[in-house]
Image (tube, grey):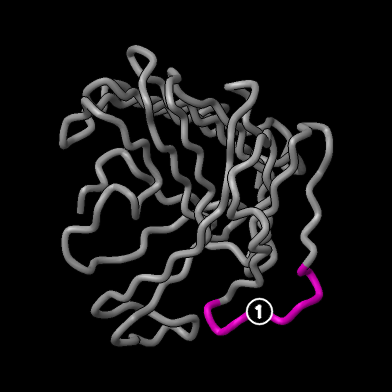
């Protein structure tokens, strides 16, 4: 796959952002990464650190640098969270994607206002989603709520830029095989995710806080 620099994210024991599986040479658009001119094929990891308080990794792929930190609070009752910084060497057009194994993804323009899903009480479709399609149109938003399919949601805060344009998109991919919720192998295997997507005509990147 053309997925170097993408990631899978777990929070509170649940998969929150996943890979779609293997179905040929999957393009960058099917992965949680930055698509921009001038990137190489493989991200080179430049730094990795793991401590009781913080795990950190930094990698570079051409003009794109990605940094991910897992902040681990000292008290067991506090919630660990992730910091994600994607930086370009110079202002450039890019598309940023985070594919979420979500029931719904809800957007709001205000960092201080918690989004609320309008489909909380609706039964999920066969693909596991109950998606609000109004958010497929780009809008200025700085906060999103990933409504999980199990018992874990995730707040997503866009710290920079100040006026990002976000939208959502649902995508289903079929791979040769995978494992169902009962642990048994399924073939063919379908994965549906909701993407949180930002598109910029000229910018140096994005910084986010992800709080499961």
The residue that disc 1 covers is 124
| The image quarter in which residue 64 lies | top left
The picture places residue 131, in percent across and down from the top left corner, at 64, 67
Q: Residue at x 44, y 44 (%)?
A: 97
User: Would you say 158 lies left or right of 119 here?
Assistant: left
Number of labels in the image equals 1
In the image, what residue occupies the spot 74% across and 36% down? 109
Left or right for 31, reference 212: left
Crowdedness of circle 1 by 10 Å Cα count: few (<14), some, many (20+)?
Answer: some
Task: In the rendered view, tell whether residue 14 sits above or below residue 63.
Answer: below
Q: Position of residue 91 (x, y in %)?
A: 39, 15
Q: Give yes or no for residue 90 being in the magenta stretch.
A: no
Q: SS for tag 1? A: loop
66 shown above or below 26: above
What is the residue that sits farthest to the top in this orientation? 90
Residue 21, by quadrant, is bottom left
In the rendered view, tell whether residue 70 sits above or below residue 194: above
- Start-end of magenta stretch: 119-127
The residue closer to the viewer here, 42 or 127, is 127
Q: Is residue 63 left or right of residue 10?
A: left
Q: 122 and 53: which one is in front?
A: 122
Q: Is residue 143 above or below residue 135?
A: above
Q: Position of residue 149 (x, y in %)?
A: 63, 69
Q: Main secondary structure of the magenta part?
A: loop
Residue ID at (41%, 72%): 191
Point 54% across, 26% down: residue: 207
Q: Quarter holding the N terminus?
A: bottom left
Residue 34 horizontal/vertical position (percent): 37, 36
């Amino acid at each position: 796959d053309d997925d170097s620099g993408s990631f899978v994210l777990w929070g509170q024991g649940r998969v929150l952002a996943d890979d779609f599986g293997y179905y040929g040479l999957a393009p960058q658009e099917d992965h949680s990464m930055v698509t921009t001119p001038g990137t190489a094929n493989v991200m080179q990891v430049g730094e990795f650190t793991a401590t009781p308080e913080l795990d950190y990794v930094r990698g570079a792929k051409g003009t794109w640098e990605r940094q991910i930190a897992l902040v681990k609070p000292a008290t067991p009752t506090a919630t660990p969270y992730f910091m994600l910084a994607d930086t370009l060497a110079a202002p450039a057009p890019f598309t940023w994607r985070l594919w979420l194994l979500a029931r719904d993804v809800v957007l709001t323009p205000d960092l201080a206002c918690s989004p609320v899903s309008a489909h909380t009480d609706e039964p999920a479709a066969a693909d596991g989603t109950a998606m609000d399609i109004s958010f497929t149109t780009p809008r200025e938003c700085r906060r999103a709520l990933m409504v999980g399919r199990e018992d874990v949601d995730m707040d997503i805060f866009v710290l920079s830029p100040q006026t990002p344009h976000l939208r959502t998109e649902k995508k289903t991919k079929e791979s040769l095989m995978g494992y169902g919720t009962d642990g048994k192998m399924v073939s063919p295997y379908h994965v549906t995710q909701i993407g949180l997507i930002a598109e910029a005509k000229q910018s140096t990147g994005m910084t986010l806080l992800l709080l499961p």
